[in-house]
């Protein structure tokens, strides 16, 4: 039950009646964005793209970068706690993403883009505004929180 007066975010369609937590969902996108920025940090032409789509009563947010992509070994361990290939990484970002998304009855998938780089796709049931904000709205919010993203986010 909601605590009195607390905004728990918009409800999903009746078929998927649970409450989304907008702060947690923002955390999901932020974690994926930071990973994408890390991945293409060494590139002379870094590019990170956020896209949103709605299909079959599911909303998708995809974060794509033009970094080196995911090796088979990395792909196998991506969502394990404390798995990191970064010198100062914690290896907690993706496990947190996965647990938040599972709590929202969704899925997170990682794949390599055909023309290089990685794509992380988060899909969730429902089509409410908390998961279907336009990429430009998402971008503005994220740029405000992640100044390094300025000029790299597309
Ligand atoms: N966009 C990406 N491109 C390439 N590798 C990635 C990407 N996102 C995550 N990874 C790999 O997954 C590992 C785990 O990510 P994460 O759980 O966020 O922890 P951390 O960022 O602290 O390393 C990273 O160290 C990296 O090897
Ligand atoms: Mg991370």
Image (tube, helix red, strand yellow):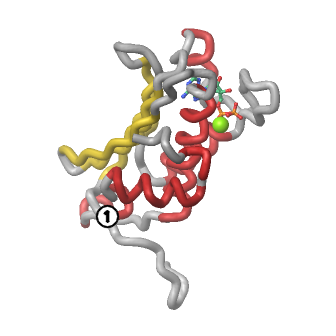
Q: Is residue 25 visible?
A: yes
Q: Quadrant of residue 75?
A: top right
Q: Residues within 10 Å of mark 1 (few under 14, many from 20)?
A: some
Q: Is residue 109 visible?
A: no
Q: In the displayed image of the protein, which residue is found farthest to the top?
A: 72
Can you give x and y, in whole percent of width and height, for residue 59 in the image?
A: 30, 49
Can you give x and y, in whole percent of width and height, for residue 54 in the image?
A: 23, 48
Q: Residue at x 57, y 54 (%)?
A: 27
* Front one among 51 and 78: 51
**Image quarter (top left, top right, bottom left or bottom right) of the C terminus:** top left
In the displayed structure, 22 sits above or below 32; it is below
Does mark 1 have its CB less than 8 Å from ligand 1? Answer: no
Q: Which element is circle 1 on? A: helix
In the displayed structure, 96 sits above or below 17; it is above
Can you give x and y, in whole percent of width and height, for residue 135 in the image?
A: 34, 50
Residue position marked by numbered label 1 in the rendering: 129
Q: Residue at x 51, y 90 (%)?
A: 5
Count of numbered circles on the image = 1
Q: In the displayed image of the protein, which residue is found farthest to the left?
A: 56
* Front one among 75 and 17: 75
Can you give x and y, in whole percent of width and height, for residue 45 in the image?
A: 49, 25
Q: In the displayed image of the protein, which residue is found farthest to the bottom?
A: 5
Q: Where is ligand 2, by quadrant?
A: top right
Q: Residue at x 41, y 45 (%)?
A: 106
Image position of 78 (left or right of 143): right
Image position of 78 (left or right of 20): right
Q: Residue at x 56, y 49 (%)?
A: 30
């Amino acid at each position: 039950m909601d605590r009195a007066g607390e905004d728990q975010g918009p409800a999903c369609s009746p078929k998927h009646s649970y409450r989304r937590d907008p702060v947690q969902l923002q955390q999901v996108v932020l974690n994926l964005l930071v990973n994408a920025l890390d991945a293409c940090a060494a590139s002379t032409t870094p590019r990170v793209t956020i896209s949103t789509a709605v299909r079959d009563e599911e909303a998708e947010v995809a974060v794509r970068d033009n970094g080196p992509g995911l090796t088979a070994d990395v792909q196998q361990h991506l969502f394990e706690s404390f798995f990191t290939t970064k010198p100062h990484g914690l290896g907690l970002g993706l496990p947190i993403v996965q647990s938040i998304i599972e709590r929202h009855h969704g899925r997170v998938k990682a794949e390599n883009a055909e023309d290089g780089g990685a794509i992380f796709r988060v899909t969730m049931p429902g089509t409410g505004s908390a998961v279907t904000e336009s990429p430009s709205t998402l971008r503005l919010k994220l740029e405000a929180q992640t100044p390094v993203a300025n000029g790299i986010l597309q």
